[in-house]
Image (cartoon, grey):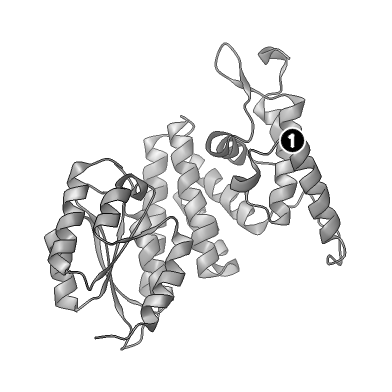
Amino acid sequence: MEPDQGHPIKVVVLRTGLSPHVIRVWEKRYGAVEPMRTPTNRRRYTDADIERLLLLQRATRIGRSIGQIAHLPTETLRNLVREDEEASLPSAPQPVSRSEPLPTQSYLDGCLDAVQQLDSFALEVVLMRARVALSQPAFIEQLIVPLMESIGDLFHDGSLRIMHEHMASAVVRSFLWSLKSSAEQSTYAPILIVATPVGQWHEIGALMVASTASAEGWDITYLGANLPAQEIAAAVQQQSAKVVALSLVYPADDPRIRQELVALRRYVGPEVKLLIGGSGSAGYQDVLEDIDAVCLDDIAQLRPHLSTLRQQPRS
């Protein structure tokens, strides 16, 4: 099929029920499909692409992770979906409507639509509704994380502008701060220092850490973004904290970060636990090992680490 004979994305949306945002994210991040391009660089999808997207949609609604199935051959994917759907029938009292999106996907689509329209009020409304419907871990891990990742992907794809990203970040930042501030804390709650080191200006990840830890019963001292190692260490000393969590996003190859991380370990000593996460943390894996820091691949790994640390005796 020639590119000019393929289906435009509007047709794919109509046939699959997936939003344009989800289709682009599945394509760009997971390689789910590889649409053809017209001479003017517009996407064109084949019937086979549409079938794959339908199969992936059905698989994710059953509970499969898109990251685990996106690269499966179509025939393997078709068999997997059939087996999963057959296995789910006995336990399902009513058939699942294939046209009805999962709640989290519906909220994600609503958030992305609001961002695209540059409508901060609508974004706040969707976030508030999602927070009521979802537990705090699900709200952060299943909505906020994919929302910010999708916004980043769409920005780099040219579908969103800087103004969209800044508006969304401002709303999400304010919302996460309110979650952190509203959590009840015990007088005896362990203290967690949360910040980003010098050169790291993206603080959404740090705020997600602060909100998550606050909900888990930790007393949070949030220092914000772009903080020198000696200032983080001074906060550790003043608060008598035993745990520091840092978020690393961009850039992922800054030599200053390496120096700051080494300096931080030297300042706080070996008894303070360092938790390092964020999309840029993988670029510093060697230095994280050298300073005996825990590298968190995603926010979902934070809660079990915090639970383990809370069970350790306090000195």
Task: Tell me the amino acid under the disc marked 1.
Answer: Thr
Determine whether the residue tagged by mark 1 lies in a helix, strand or loop.
helix
How many numbered badges does the structure rendering display?
A: 1
Q: Residue at x 35, y 72 (%)?
A: 181
Q: Residue furthest bottom?
A: 187
From this view, report whether residue 114 is shown above or below residue 303.
above
Instruction: Give the labeled residue for mark 1.
Output: 74
Q: Residue at x 31, y 88 (%)?
A: 188
Asked if residue 13 lies left or right of residue 38, the reply is right
Task: Residue 300: give x, y in percent of width and height.
Answer: 48, 62
The answer to which quarter of the image holds residue 30 is top right
Asked if residue 50 lies left or right of residue 94, the reply is left
The answer to which quarter of the image holds residue 244 is bottom left
The quarter in which the C terminus is drawn is: bottom left
Mark 1 neighbour class, 10 Å CA radius: few under 14, some 14 to 19, many 20 or more: some
Asked if residue 312 lies left or right of residue 300, the reply is left
Q: Is residue 228 visible?
A: no
Asked if residue 35 lies left or right of residue 165, the reply is right
Task: Residue 139: give x, y in percent of width and height.
Answer: 52, 63
From this view, report whether residue 130 is shown above or below residue 40.
below
Q: Is residue 162 visible?
A: yes
The quarter in which the N terminus is drawn is: top right
From this view, report whether residue 95 is shown above or below residue 99.
below
Task: Residue 283: give x, y in percent of width and height.
Answer: 33, 44
Q: Residue at x 63, y 25 (%)?
A: 35
Is 252 or 108 nearer to us in this picture? 252
